[in-house]
Image (spheres, helix red, strand yellow):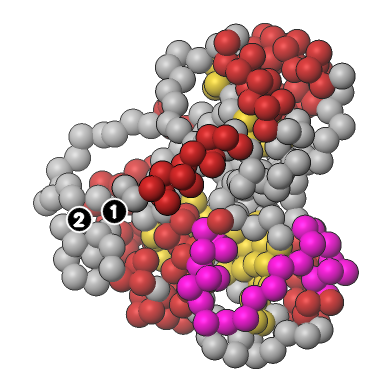
């Protein structure tokens, strides 16, 4: 590589924000998005398929009865008019935001919105503005100057803070300004709402983005909305058009994982563990009391890395979240609580955390 690229890597190392891959075999899991533990229960039944690989994009050779059946199931389960499956949540957001808003339109997004939405917005020809996180007054100021068709983008449960959006107030405000609300439910589905159907379930929104790689313990994503939106994305969303479709068996497994999530017992166990963690830690942070994501701000790259190292040395799979993923000065430890964590594991985790937070 040319020296200028190597220098960028060196700058990351010097700032403490250099990223690298890591393995946590046989560690206690407090870092994955497998909130209900469904990835541990995944059973691949022996079934005969004409093929395993999809062999092409959905528009060429990659469509199948399994794919269409899965989308019908998703639309029915989440009570949407239609569903379109994408290979990942990143692909879904990229395709949706890069293709639907047009030149002359406006996208207004929460300042803490996920990177996949930001990237989709960058590929759009629309104007875009951010509003202060979860701040209705800030959003209304941006809505008052917006032009063309206006889109508002939020997450229902924010992945880096573990807090939830004021969804009902957002819906009222978007109606007032005739704006189209798009809700990313990636971290909420499976966990929050009726039978884990998310916080935007049965709410009047333009589109919902759901993923299967977090609460549902598998892989892939879908955009839920109208039939017209589905047909539009099939025709214009490049991350759908130009990618090889999921393997045929994956569509069956998506449905299987969602069906296995409908028993509320896992969500009851998860909430019990969330409550126990917060009580033991006397939690005073910003994360919601129903969120499996509980963040502890540890300002300073070195401070966050050192605390993560101590936790890892005690066999806990926990990672520090550093800038640029979060703003500089807001570094943190992100604790993911699961239905399968034991009270003893939580107690030991808290015993290490408490002295570092005083």
Q: Quadrant of residue 21?
A: top left
Q: Quadrant of residue 20?
A: top left
Up the image or down, 147 lies above or below 161; here it is: below
Up the image or down, 112 lies above or below 16; here it is: below
Describe residue 248's horizontal placement relative to residue 221 as left or right. Answer: left
Q: Position of residue 137 (x, y in %)?
A: 88, 69
On whether residue 274 falls in the magenta region, the answer is: no
Describe residue 313's horizontal placement relative to residue 301 as left or right. Answer: left
Question: Pointers 2 and 1 in contact (CB under 8 A)?
Answer: yes
Between residues 40 and 77, which one lies in front from this camera angle? 40
Please tell me how crowded label 2 is: few (under 14), some (14-19), or many (20+) other residues with Cα within 10 Å: many
Describe residue 236's horizontal placement relative to residue 9 as left or right. Answer: left
Look at 51% across and 64% down and name the residue there: 119
Look at 69% across and 89% down and name the residue there: 147
**Which span is picked out in magenta?**
116-140
Look at 81% across and 13% down and name the residue there: 355
What kind of element bears circle 2?
Answer: loop
Q: Position of residue 158 (x, y in %)?
A: 67, 49
Q: Position of residue 45 (x, y in %)?
A: 26, 34
Residue pointed to by mark 1: 246
Between residues 254 and 321, which one lies in front from this camera angle? 321
Describe residue 70's horizontal placement relative to residue 142 as left or right. Answer: left
Number of numbered discs: 2
Q: Position of residue 11 (x, y in %)?
A: 54, 42
What kind of element bears circle 1?
Answer: loop
Q: Could one spot residue 213 in this view of the protein?
A: no
């Amino acid at each position: 590589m040319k020296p200028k690229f190597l220098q960028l890597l060196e700058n990351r190392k010097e700032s403490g924000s250099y990223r690298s891959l890591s393995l946590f075999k046989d560690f206690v899991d407090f870092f994955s998005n497998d909130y209900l533990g469904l990835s541990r229960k995944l059973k691949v039944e022996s079934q005969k398929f004409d093929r395993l690989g999809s062999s092409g994009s959905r528009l060429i050779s990659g469509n199948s009865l399994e794919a269409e059946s899965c989308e019908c199931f998703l639309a029915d389960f989440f009570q949407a008019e239609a569903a379109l499956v994408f290979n990942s949540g990143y692909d879904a957001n990229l395709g949706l935001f890069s293709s639907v808003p047009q030149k002359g339109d406006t996208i207004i997004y929460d300042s803490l919105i996920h990177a996949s939405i930001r990237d989709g917005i960058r590929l759009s020809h629309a104007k875009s503005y951010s509003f202060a996180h979860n701040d209705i007054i800030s959003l209304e100021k941006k809505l008052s100057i917006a032009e063309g068709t206006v889109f508002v983008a939020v997450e229902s449960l924010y992945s880096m803070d573990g807090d939830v959006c004021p969804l009902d107030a957002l819906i009222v405000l978007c109606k007032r300004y005739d704006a189209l609300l798009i809700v990313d439910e990636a971290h909420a589905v499976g966990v929050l709402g009726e039978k884990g159907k998310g916080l935007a379930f049965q709410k009047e929104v333009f589109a919902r983005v759901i993923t299967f790689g977090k609460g549902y313990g598998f892989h892939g994503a879908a955009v839920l909305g109208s039939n017209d939106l589905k047909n539009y994305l099939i025709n214009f969303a490049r991350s759908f058009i130009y990618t090889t479709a999921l393997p045929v068996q994956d569509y069956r497994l998506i449905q299987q994982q969602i069906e296995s999530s409908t028993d509320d017992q896992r969500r009851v166990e998860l909430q019990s563990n969330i409550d126990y963690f917060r009580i033991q830690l006397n939690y005073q942070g910003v994360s919601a009391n129903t969120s499996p994501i509980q963040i502890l701000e540890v300002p300073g790259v070195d401070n966050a890395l050192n605390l993560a190292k101590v936790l890892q040395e005690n066999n806990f799979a926990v990672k520090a979240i550093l800038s640029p993923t979060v703003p500089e000065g807001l570094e943190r430890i992100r604790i993911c609580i699961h239905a399968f964590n034991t009270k003893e594991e939580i107690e030991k985790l808290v015993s290490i955390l408490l002295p570092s937070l005083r």
